[in-house]
Image (cartoon, grey):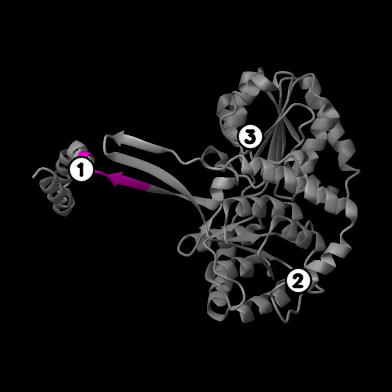
Amino acid sequence: MITIKYPKREDWASIIRRPHLDVSELTATVKSVLDDVKARGDEAVREYELKFDKAELDSLAVTAEEIDEAENLVDAQLKDAIRLAHSNIKTFHEAQQFNEVRVETQPGVECWQKSVAIERVGLYIPGGTAPLFSTVLMLATPAKIAGCKEIVLCTPPGRNGKVNPAILVAARTAGVSKIFKAGGVQAIGAMAYGTESVPKVYKIFGPGNQYVMAAKQQVSLHDVAIDMPAGPSEVCVIADANANAEFVAADLLSQAEHGVDSQVLMITTSETMASLVEAEVERQLNLLPRRDMAAKALDNSKIVVVASEDEAMELSNTYAPEHLILQTSSYAELSQKVVNAGSVFLGKYACESAGDYASGTNHTLPTHGYATAYSGVNLDSYCRKITFQHLTEEGIRRIGHAVEAMAAAESLDAHKQAMTVRIKEVER
């Protein structure tokens, strides 16, 4: 990691710059796969599964027997952990349910909102080097609470044609309706367009590599909604002189092991702490099975020493991290100054791993600075708000002439007429 001491404000932009991913070359590849899936459905998906995942499939659907088998393959301790995490995620997201409020804006004019679940949602769960069964819980649990009628999950199989058993156990625990063996761009295409097996969904959720992200962005232009734009995962840790250097290093590395394009940023008011953490990162890095991947991520990463905690918070808000850890004595005070972040972890015991798995908050979060405008996945992500209004004769008397005047000023005569005919009736 590079250490930068007391940078000038004009240097902040270069400090917080994310690793650049040039997706221009893969755009055409992604489009060709999407077009093929749209045209040929299941047949195309199976061919791409053989090509990319080396899995020869007779059927895309996961059977009930395969899920039963998975239950026997996952050890009891992990199943208990999955159930605990699911319970906490469920509790947290149930508390987000919408309460309908009716408002009388004028006598005789009543307005209200109704929260309605998206009927059919698609969840993409990566496989590969780290099958993210925890993401199944994060995405399916709020979908179930929201009342989505159909929850479709796509995830790549192994070469043996089987889905990771922990993914299947998590899916059953969270109430997923249908599970399909499909990964990568072909999975996104299947859910966006529908195939003989995979239903077309109305919104797609979930992380993935740069091909998956490009596919999600392409299908979102015309065919289906997506949860949010996303890039490589990231964390920012703000630490003071009293922080635990071992904890800080562990937090930085837990993020760095996600992938070579991940980024970690530490901001501290203590030069001593910066040196301690740098040494501790080196020590812990050598103990990691994924150390080569984490080491490459650290090449994109920085330790920044600043003059004050206020400056640390200002730099963090400019960065807008996916994950923000406040390991300072004044974390409660600093938490009030958070403006841009996906999820915030307070104090020395609140590691990012807690939120990634089992505290109850959602780990599907905006990356790449999108926390300036996007929320992480929550219950509202699976709902639409439909507005209603009811007018009585008194309501027409109260707002009718204002509507006429505004419609006339916009030269929309039919709009004016729709109100005028009602005014004439109530004023007879």
Q: Nearer the viewer, mark 3 or mark 2?
A: 2
Identify the residue shown where x is 66% and y is 17%: 308
> Distance from label 3 to label 1 (Cα)?
62 Å
Q: Amino acid at mark 2?
A: Ala
Q: Is residue 393 magenta?
A: yes
Dot 3 alpha-carbon crowd within 10 angstroms: few under 14, some 14 to 19, many 20 or more: some
Residue 427, x across and y down, in percent: 10, 42
Considering only order in the chain, which callout, 2 or 1, is on the residue closer to the N terminus?
Answer: 2
Task: Tell me which residue sits at (73%, 72%) in the image.
Answer: 62
Q: Residue furthest left?
A: 428
Q: Residue at x 61, y 49 (%)?
A: 20
Amino acid type at image mark 1: Glu
Q: Are marks 3 and 2 in contact (CB under 8 Å)?
A: no
**Number of dots carrying numbers:** 3
Viewer-proximal residue among 58 and 145: 145
Q: Residue 393 got which mark? A: 1
Q: Which mark, residue 15?
A: 3
Q: Which residues are magenta?
A: 388-394
Q: Is residue 351 visible?
A: yes
Q: Quadrant of residue 171?
A: bottom right
Separation of disc 1 and disc 2 at Cα? 58 Å
| Residue type pointed to by label 3 | Ile
